[in-house]
Image (cartoon, grey):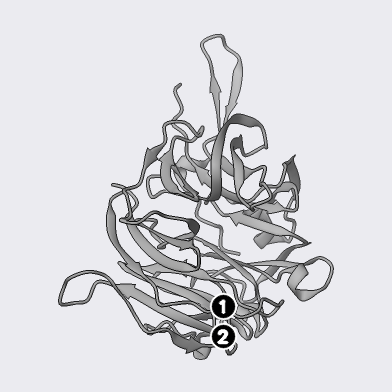
Amino acid sequence: MRRLLLLPALTAALLTACTGTEEVTYAVQLNVLTDTDTSGRATQLRALNTDGGAVNTVAVTGGVQVLPTSSTRRVITVRSDAAETRAPDGSDPQAFADPGFTPCYTRAAQDAGRTRLLLLSECSGVQRAALFDSASRTLVWSALLPTYLPPVTTNDTPPTRLAVQGDVGLVTRARLNGGSEVIRVAVPTTGGSAEASVPLAIPAVFDLAPSGARILAATDTGIQALKTTGEPDSATTLTAFGATRYDRLWTGGTLIAAWRSNVLAGTGDTPLRLWDSAPTAAATTAATVATLSGIRDLTLPGDGKAYVLAGQNLNRYDVTLGLSTGNWAVKTLRTLTEPLSIAWTVPVTTP
């Protein structure tokens, strides 16, 4: 089995202080939004090391999502009324630019290189999208989306999802007559302001995630790449996951993870599956990491581990070991209060 390439900066180290005592330092740190209130928004941002130990906790208002940055030295926090980058311990918030409207942010997405941040605002039924440069936190464009008439929600109703390719934003949302519709938002080649396309009817899309130059979609018939029009391409179905429905999709480097919601499936625990999509990888079928219920989020930092928020628990799985031997060395690192979203950073260490 091909060994996963680990980022050199993410390997654990033992430092000896001037007193001669050994101190474990964690090159990867986790940032988790927790303590979700009745509105579904988080009120705490917790910084944890990769053994679950507390580093710091700061209060946040209206926490929606956390995401890593391209530099890995800061974390993005998206809140209902703003977005900012923060230091790994949650301090030093630095705001993204004003989007040109009063936002009610509900979700976010990044491109594969984490150079662009796409935010969706939904205020009183009006949807707007804003694209930012993640490094400078400047606005690239913002646009009003076409009027949305959501259908009655059932277990088969697709959620609203976002994706980014270059400076093009993609929004999929449930279609009134069934399935999904996709909207492409971009600045026309002739220049000017960003424009949203007329919604295109497509098969139901339950999640989106970047994978290299492609955007992958979780559909009723498997995981498929999107065409340039935003429509899932059935000819690209990833056979490693089979022709079956998944509700959540995550990517990190060449790793792809997928999970079918136990709530939407109306079952007990369901398999969390993971596949290394690198051309040199030996396995052609996604492996089952664990059977879980209530997965809220997952992150794949590149340190050879997967960190999963399942119910109230933060679990760690050894991806390198699991893919090569089938032993995922699962460990519950911490029990949290209503966790919502997880991301990773690489804090600056001082010897």
Q: Residue at x 67, y 46 (%)?
A: 37
Taking the image as shown, residue 138 lies to the left or right of residue 334, namely: left
The extreme front residue here reads 124
On the image, the x and y values in percent for residue 326 come to: 73, 61
Q: Residue at x 67, y 37 (%)?
A: 51
On the image, the x and y values in percent for residue 252 come to: 51, 59
Query: Which residue is labeled 2 in the image?
Result: 176
Q: Residue at x 39, y 67 (%)?
A: 164
On the image, the x and y values in percent for residue 202 come to: 50, 87
Query: Which residue is labeled 1 in the image?
Result: 150
Going from N to C along the chain, the mark reached first, 2 or 1, is 1
Q: Do the residues labelled 2 and 1 touch (CB within 8 Å)?
A: yes
Q: How far apart are marks 2 and 1 (CA)?
A: 6 Å
Q: Which amino acid does label 1 sit on?
A: Pro
Q: What residue type is labelled 2?
A: Leu
Instruction: Using the image, tell me which numbered label, if any, was put on residue 120.
Output: none
On the image, the x and y values in percent for residue 208 come to: 52, 71
Secondary-structure class at tag 1: loop
